[in-house]
């Protein structure tokens, strides 16, 4: 299938006291039409910065995109002018953010905020835009949409706010929806509702989705393909079934091991990976995961692992095959 | 809403009553009594003073005098000025519009300078212009008001002249004597007094505006607005500005009494015939009917503008509810 978005070798860094924080270090991924891509990794691994760089929603400065391309609809988004890019944002790419409370403007009504993209991108009148926004609000399951349009964000519950945020992202029927940890701030029961909602919407509207999460179990039934990130690198990439069946990077194995599994008979203690992802003040000369890795060999300290093919559609960046413990 | 305003109005009336008791007591307890301003005057004999005291009822105890004053005021009679003999209310209504014109102009000019420059400075953070503006603002903020007013007079009324030898800008009064009212002439008279106050207060408001704006443009909802593809102008004017103005309105509310206090200085330096001057003159002569009236009008303006600020606040921020 055709790629709707193809990101190659993206590098983003932030100016910090005394140097740079290398947040994204040559990330490549693609999303094809109708596909849902999950981007997974612990907090601080560069997931948000990777996708926010594509639409240049990172603060610049201190941020700086130093390399890469992001082909979307035949154009490189990273080369567009601010004006050209603003025609893509909201119209062709919809965004949903982690904190629905702070991501809405507290002083404007929900209706006002939902209709804005329609006014700027499609030139609709206020009435037309209101009608469309109401339609979207009822689509995402908000009762009495006409009345709720007049409410302010603080009058919505957390789950309702995130539903409204999804409606706002979809109001111009974008080809791509980017959701950055859209359920992390919500209660567990509401998380599941939001995932179910997005699945339904995907079926009705057919858009591609990038869904960022640190919780692999959450998107098990949602994502078609997974990209695992660590320290600003893509360290494994595979269709979701292959990733579950054959995780080929120690970090992914760690993430999966720390998931409770339904098919297990006895109660196993949840395993987690010790330590935290690093903040890279200079580009590493070896594998950034090496300090936390059980399988580390001498080469890991010398060379940053390349993404190597494990099987068809499945690549991992590890010098060792963790199943055989042999170097690849 | 109406209920809220009614309740606040009732509170305001109570506040004004308390204020009136306090200032009546203060004025009545000036050393030497209300007539002290005349007791040193050789034109007044002891008999004259006694007669005046009798006439104005100054021999009654203070609470009785206050009660009489209040009863009269409630019937719309604020007494007559000791010096001009005209009704105190007349004195005020002659001058209050002048003060409101001066304060209103200075208020508008302050905001017209401070808000755009503050926004600009924030959006261009750490550029040459930002550094320039913040440095100038810091300097402006530290100017002593009197000194700056005199400097303005020296430059624009003494040193700089029109081709026919008149001062470039008038430094006293609010109109050229002997001429009928003329808008241009009024504006020319406003320039120096308004500049004195506006430049100094604009300097501090600019700095507040800058930091409030900087605070807001890093908020999540501003990123959301950009993420929706709004043009940057709309992001700033619709999403950032309104949030950035909320703390400025709070500040303005706190600052209003100072604004009215500023009238006293300005009207004195630039001989502006407003109630600030009236206050000064009547205080010098312990002209208490006028003094009471002026202070009550000041208090009313402050109480009323605080109510107004609270209302503006609720319009700007829907999270604030009136009750
Ligand atoms: N505005 C910023 N300024 C400086 N560093 C930042 C900024 N935003 C993100 N970073 C850094 O970039 C790295 C990746 O962050 P992020 O992409 O937010 O991680 P996550 O995978 O949790 O989404 C982190 O080290 C973070 O500290
Ligand atoms: Mg994140």
Image (cartoon, coloured by chain):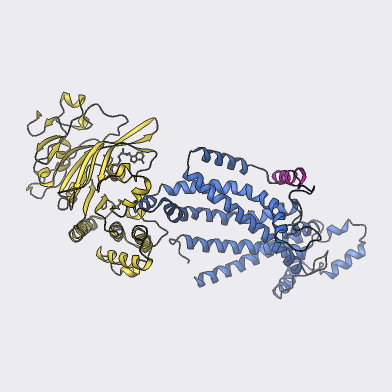
Where in the figure is residue B222, as x and y percent of width and height? 39, 51
The foreground one among A108 and A276 is A108
**Chain letter for the blue colouring in the rendering:** B
Residue A150 visible (yes or no): no
Where in the figure is residue A314, as x and y percent of width and height? 12, 40
Where in the figure is residue B104, as x and y percent of width and height? 64, 59
The number of numbered discs placed on residues in the rendered structure image is 0
Residue B153 is covered by the magenta coloring: yes
Q: What is the span of residues highlighted in magenta in the rendered image?
A: B146-166
The foreground one among A170 and A189 is A170
Residue at coordinates 67% horizontally, 52% vertically from top-left? Answer: B194
Against B226, is A299 above or below?
above
Residue A172 image-quadrant placement? bottom left
Residue A292 image-quadrant placement? top left
Residue at coordinates 57% horizontally, 53% vertically from top-left? Answer: B112
Residue at coordinates 31% horizontally, 29% vertically from top-left? Answer: A282
Where in the figure is residue B245, as x and y percent of width and height? 50, 54
Residue B224 is covered by the magenta coloring: no
Against B203, is B9 above or below?
below
Name the side, left or right, on which A14 lies relative to B64.
Answer: left
Main SS, magenta residues: helix
């Amino acid at each position: 299938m055709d790629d709707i978005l193809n990101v190659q070798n993206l590098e983003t860094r932030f100016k910090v006291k005394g140097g740079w924080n290398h947040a994204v270090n040559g990330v490549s991924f693609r999303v094809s039409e109708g596909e849902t891509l999950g981007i997974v990794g612990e907090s601080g691994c560069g997931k948000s910065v990777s996708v926010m760089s594509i639409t240049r929603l990172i603060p610049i400065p201190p941020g700086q995109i130093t390399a890469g391309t992001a082909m979307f609809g035949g154009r490189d988004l990273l080369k567009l002018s601010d004006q050209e890019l603003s025609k893509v944002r909201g119209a062709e790419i919809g965004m949903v953010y982690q904190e629905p409370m702070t991501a809405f403007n507290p002083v404007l009504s929900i209706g006002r905020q939902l209709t804005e993209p329609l006014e700027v991108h499609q030139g609709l009148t206020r009435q037309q835009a209101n009608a469309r926004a109401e339609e979207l609000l009822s689509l995402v399951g908000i009762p009495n949409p006409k009345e709720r349009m007049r409410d302010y964000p603080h009058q919505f519950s957390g789950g309702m706010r995130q539903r409204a945020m999804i409606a706002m992202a979809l109001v111009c029927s974008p080809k791509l929806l980017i959701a950055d940890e859209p359920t992390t701030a919500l209660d567990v029961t509401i998380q599941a509702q939001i995932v179910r909602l997005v699945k339904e919407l995907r079926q009705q509207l057919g858009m591609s989705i990038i869904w960022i999460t640190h919780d692999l179990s959450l998107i098990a039934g949602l994502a078609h393909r997974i990209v695992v990130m660590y320290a600003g690198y893509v360290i494994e990439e595979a269709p979701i079934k292959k990733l579950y069946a054959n995780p080929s990077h120690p970090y992914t194995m760690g993430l999966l091991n720390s998931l409770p599994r339904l098919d297990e008979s006895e109660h196993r203690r949840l395993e987690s990976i010790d330590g935290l992802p690093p903040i890279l003040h200079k580009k590493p000369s070896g594998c950034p995961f090496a300090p936390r890795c059980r399988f580390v060999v001498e080469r890991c300290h010398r060379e940053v692992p390349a993404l190597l093919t494990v099987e068809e559609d499945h690549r991992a960046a590890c010098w060792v095959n963790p199943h055989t413990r042999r170097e690849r | 809403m109406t209920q809220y305003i009614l309740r606040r109005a009732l509170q305001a009336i109570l506040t004004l009553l308390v204020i009136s008791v306090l200032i009546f007591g203060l004025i009545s307890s000036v050393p030497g009594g209300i007539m002290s301003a005349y007791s040193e005057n050789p034109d007044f004999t002891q008999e004259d003073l006694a007669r005046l005291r009798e006439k104005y009822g100054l021999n009654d105890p203070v609470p009785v005098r206050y009660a009489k004053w209040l009863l009269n005021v409630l019937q719309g009679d604020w007494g007559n000025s000791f010096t001009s003999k005209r009704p105190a209310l007349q004195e005020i209504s002659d001058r209050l519009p002048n003060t409101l014109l001066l304060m209103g102009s200075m208020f508008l000019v302050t905001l017209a300078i401070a808000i755009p420059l503050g926004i600009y400075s924030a959006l261009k953070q750490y550029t040459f212009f930002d550094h320039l503006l913040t440095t100038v603002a810091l300097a402006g903020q530290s100017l002593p008001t009197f000194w700056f007013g005199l400097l303005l007079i020296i430059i624009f009324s003494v040193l700089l002249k029109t081709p026919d030898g008149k001062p470039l800008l008038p430094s006293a009064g609010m109109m050229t004597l002997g001429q009928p009212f003329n808008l241009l002439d009024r504006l020319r008279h406003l320039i120096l007094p308004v500049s004195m106050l506006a430049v100094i207060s604009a300097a501090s408001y600019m700095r507040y505006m800058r930091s409030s704006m900087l605070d807001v443009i890093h908020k999540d909802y501003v990123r959301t607005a950009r993420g929706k593809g709004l043009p940057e102008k709309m992001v700033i004017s619709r999403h950032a500005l309104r949030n950035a103005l909320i703390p400025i309105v709070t500040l303005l509310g706190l600052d209003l009494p100072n604004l009215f206090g500023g009238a006293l200085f300005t009207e004195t330096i630039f001989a502006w015939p407003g109630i600030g001057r009236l206050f000064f003159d009547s205080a010098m002569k312990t002209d208490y009917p006028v003094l009471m009236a002026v202070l009550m009008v000041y208090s009313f303006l402050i109480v009323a503008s605080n109510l107004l600020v609270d209302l503006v606040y609720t319009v700007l921020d829907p999270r604030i509810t009136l009750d």
